Image: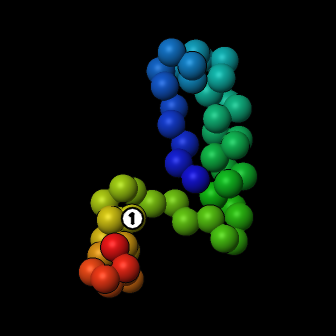
Amino acid sequence: MALALHPFVIGQPFRAKYLDQALEFLAGQPDVWLTTSDEIAEHYRRTVSAEDA
């Protein structure tokens, strides 16, 4: 799941603690992979054959 955080929605100071709490909870889950888009692309290149793409 991608999480898009637009400044006009999350960019309010009072929302920061709730974002921190949510991210801390998600990061603590055993099946959650916190990653970057580059890491996802690299994983895809390593695991998906050209025929499957």
Q: With 1 as the anchor, is 48 left or right in this view?
A: left
Q: Residue at x 32, y 65 (%)?
A: 41
Label 1 SS: helix
Q: Residue at x 47, y 21 (%)?
A: 7
Q: Picture coordinates of residue 47 (x, y %)? A: 38, 83
Q: Is residue 12 visible?
A: yes
Q: Which residue is mark 1?
A: 40
Q: Quadrant of residue 38?
A: bottom left
The answer to whether 41 is drawn above or below residue 19 in the figure is below
Q: Picture coordinates of residue 46 (x, y %)? A: 32, 82
Q: Picture coordinates of residue 24 (x, y %)? A: 66, 50
Q: Picture coordinates of residue 33 (x, y %)? A: 55, 66
Q: With 44 as the anchor, is 26 left or right in this view?
A: right
Mark 1, residues whose alpha carbon is within 10 Å: few (<14), some, or many (≥20)? few
Closer-to-camera residue (18/41): 41
Q: Residue at x 51, y 37 (%)?
A: 4
Report the number of numbered marks. Answer: 1
